[in-house]
């Protein structure tokens, strides 16, 4: 059972999520909050496997709340829910430490899969807006000399694997492309995460876009399982 805290200022939205994320589907909503401030206390109390976070909220929005949650607990897993067209805000949420984002009007099955992925330590970037959001990373790049140094620590083969991750390839697809075993790719992926200081595949994807490893002309189709 995956424990979840819902953060949204609209009760109707939270009610809809409760319907989607209920026990028959393997979820347990262990807490709710109507703004970012309340979310900090609720997450600290409930210690959920995943936080489903709205972006637009009073007092403290989803980006600021995500940043505060990750500062308090680097292991926290946040899935941001948003509406279409908020590319800059979503980019900011990913930089704040969110493990992914999903559109509010996505099918229920997609939201369930997204929460499962984030709770399991993976990332989820909704393909409906993924390419546009990651292109925003390239037009508004982060300035982080330390990150550039970390990128330079990758071996040539690790860089090849990172490029594959950035293009949305699975480990099996990368292995076939590089003509190596899938276990070897998995080992490289773990080392890449460690060297770059990212927590999951979504973090590696945005790092790859942020630092020119992959480019806007080749938007990734993020693995969703």
Image (cartoon, rainbow, N blue to C red):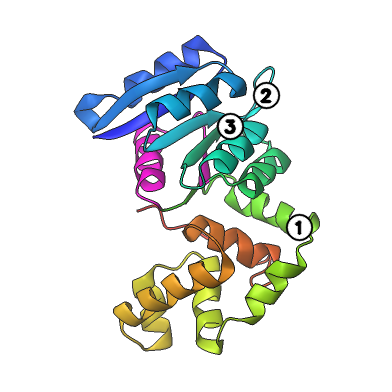
Structural distance between the alpha carbons of marks 2 and 3: 15 Å
In the image shown, does 76 or 140 lie closer to the viewer? 76
Quarter of the picture holding the N terminus: top left
Q: Secondary structure at mark 3?
A: strand
Mark 1 and mark 3 lie on one chain; the one further toward the N terminus is: 3
How many numbered circles does the render carry?
3
Q: Is residue 29 magenta?
A: no
Residue occupying image coordinates x 61% and y 21%: 37
Counting from the top left corner in percent of width and height, residue 173 is at 38, 74
Structural distance between the alpha carbons of marks 1 and 3: 22 Å
Q: Are the two marked residues, 1 and 3, in contact with CB atoms closer than 8 angstroms?
A: no
Left or right, 64 with respect to 100, comes to right
Q: Which picture quadrant has residue 189?
A: bottom left
- Which disc is residue 60 wearing? 2
Q: Secondary structure at mark 1?
A: loop
Left or right, 87 with respect to 48, comes to right
Q: Is residue 212 above or below residue 127?
A: below
Judging by the rendered image, the residue that carries numbered circle 1 is: 142
Residue occupying image coordinates x 65% and y 55%: 134
In the image shown, does 71 or 106 lie closer to the viewer? 71
Q: Which residues are magenta?
A: 99-121
Counting from the top left corner in percent of width and height, residue 3 is at 32, 31
Residue 64 appearing in the image: yes
Q: Is residue 113 magenta?
A: yes
Residue occupying image coordinates x 50% and y 67%: 193
- Name the mark nearer the viewer: 1 or 2: 2
Q: Which picture quadrant has residue 208?
A: bottom right
Residue occupying image coordinates x 51% and y 47%: 74
Q: Are the two marked residues, 1 and 2, in contact with CB atoms closer than 8 angstroms?
A: no
- Name the mark nearer the viewer: 1 or 3: 1
Mark 2 and mark 3 lie on one chain; the one further toward the N terminus is: 2
- Which disc is residue 82 wearing? 3
């Amino acid at each position: 059972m995956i424990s979840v805290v819902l953060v949204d200022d609209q009760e109707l939205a939270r009610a809809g999520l409760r319907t989607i994320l209920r026990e028959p589907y393997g979820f347990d909503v262990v807490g709710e909050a109507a703004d970012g401030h309340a979310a900090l206390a609720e997450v600290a109390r409930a210690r959920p496997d995943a936080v489903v976070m709205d972006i637009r909220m009073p007092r403290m929005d989803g980006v600021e709340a995500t940043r505060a949650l990750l500062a308090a607990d680097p292991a926290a897993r946040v899935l941001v829910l948003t509406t279409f067209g908020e590319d800059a805000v979503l980019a900011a949420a990913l930089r704040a430490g969110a493990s992914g984002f999903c559109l509010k009007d996505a099918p229920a099955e997609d939201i369930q899969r997204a929460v499962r992925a984030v709770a399991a330590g993976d990332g989820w970037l909704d393909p409906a807006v993924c390419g546009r959001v990651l292109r925003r990373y390239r037009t508004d790049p982060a300035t982080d000399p330390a990150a550039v140094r970390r990128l330079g620590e990758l071996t040539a083969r690790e860089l090849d694997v990172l490029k594959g991750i950035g293009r949305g390839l699975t480990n099996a697809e990368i292995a076939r492309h590089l003509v190596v075993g899938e276990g070897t790719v998995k080992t490289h992926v773990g080392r890449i995460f460690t060297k770059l200081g990212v927590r999951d595949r979504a973090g590696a994807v945005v790092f790859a876009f942020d630092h020119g490893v992959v480019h806007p002309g080749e938007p990734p189709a993020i693995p969703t399982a």
